[in-house]
Image (spheres, helix red, strand yellow):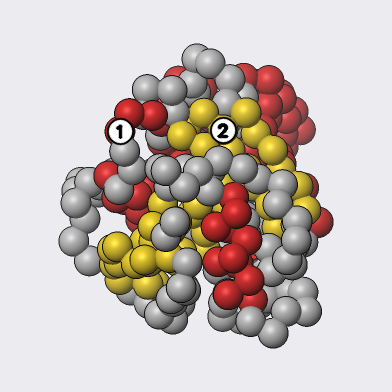
Amino acid sequence: MNYRYETAKKDYTDLASGRVLYHAPGSAPFPVRLASEIFCRALALLKQDQEKKGYKIYDPCCGSGYLLTVLGFLHAGKIREIWATDYDAEILETAARNLSLLTPAGLRKREAEIREYIKKYGKPSHVDALASAKKLKSLQKQEPVKITCRQRDITKPGENPVNDANMIITDLPYGNLVSWQGHEENPINRLFENVWQALYLDNAVVVIVTDGQKLKHPQFQRVHQLKAGKRRVSFFKPLV
Ligand SMILES: C[S@@+](CC[C@H](N)C(=O)[O-])C[C@H]1O[C@@H](n2cnc3c(N)ncnc32)[C@H](O)[C@@H]1O
């Protein structure tokens, strides 16, 4: 694929899963360059008048929160609020720990944890991780970002805890690692219906990553798409 925004290959080692950001066993970290490219393309589809105060972003299948945390560091200035939900309560513990790194207190706690590892094991990888934590600190936003992380089955109708989101960005369950949970026959339709309720309809974009599956829903118009390897990334605007 052709990158439009992340045109140069950068070194994203500081954001590697398991270094400063926590890794959840069985999860596959989303490629950082692609995550940032997607975010920039989504941003270009939003009205810019809200940019100064920042956008509210939501991942309803957040897994370990890796994707959101990476975006929270790389695009801190553009994000004022983050919502992260997932069906799996266990993986949400990792998501909460990852997202806490976006706050000064959370990153301080992680630094202290890594210092303890250095004392205990003296491994060069822990020394490198501490250096990365220091670099990540410089990416943090001055004003605190509001973060909510909680359990939710995004296929279940009737519950709408999230309002006025500007950007929904989510990597759907697919492949061998993760599959849909819950009891809905058509989880993707339910997801579309639920995310529609979560949007600030006047200025919103929904980005869904699949393993190639083409998506459509009567409440949304697809306005853009890209393919990156096996992944298909579709950008939708809600119809009002
Ligand atoms: C591909 S993973 C997302 C990985 C995530 N982007 C990250 O950075 O770790 C898909 C996630 O969808 C979640 N999931 C499966 N069924 C769900 C449902 N009904 N409601 C909400 N989340 C669900 C899985 O628990 C899994 O964490």
Select label 2 or label 1 by which is in front.
1
Please tell me which residue lies in front, 236 or 92. Answer: 236
For residue 220, say whether it is visible: yes
Q: Where residue 87 appears, x then y in whole percent?
A: 75, 62
Q: CA distance from mark 2 to mark 1?
A: 17 Å
Which residue is under mark 2? Answer: 81
Left or right of 198: which side holds 50? left
Instruction: Indicate yes or no: mark 1 CB to ligand 1 under 8 Å.
Output: no
Q: Quadrant of the C terminus?
A: bottom left
Q: Amino acid at mark 1?
A: Gln
Query: Where is residue 76, by image quadrant?
Result: top left
Left or right of 226: which side holds 160? right
Q: Which residue is pictured at 29% across the width and 62% down the height?
A: 223
Q: Which mark identifies residue 48?
A: 1
Q: Where residue 213 appears, x then y in whole percent?
A: 44, 81
Q: Which residue is pictured at 76% across the width and 47% down the height?
A: 150
Q: Is residue 1 above or below residue 100?
A: below
Q: Amino acid at mark 2?
A: Glu
Please tell me which residue lies in front, 90 or 14. Answer: 90
Please tell me which residue lies in front, 41 or 8. Answer: 41
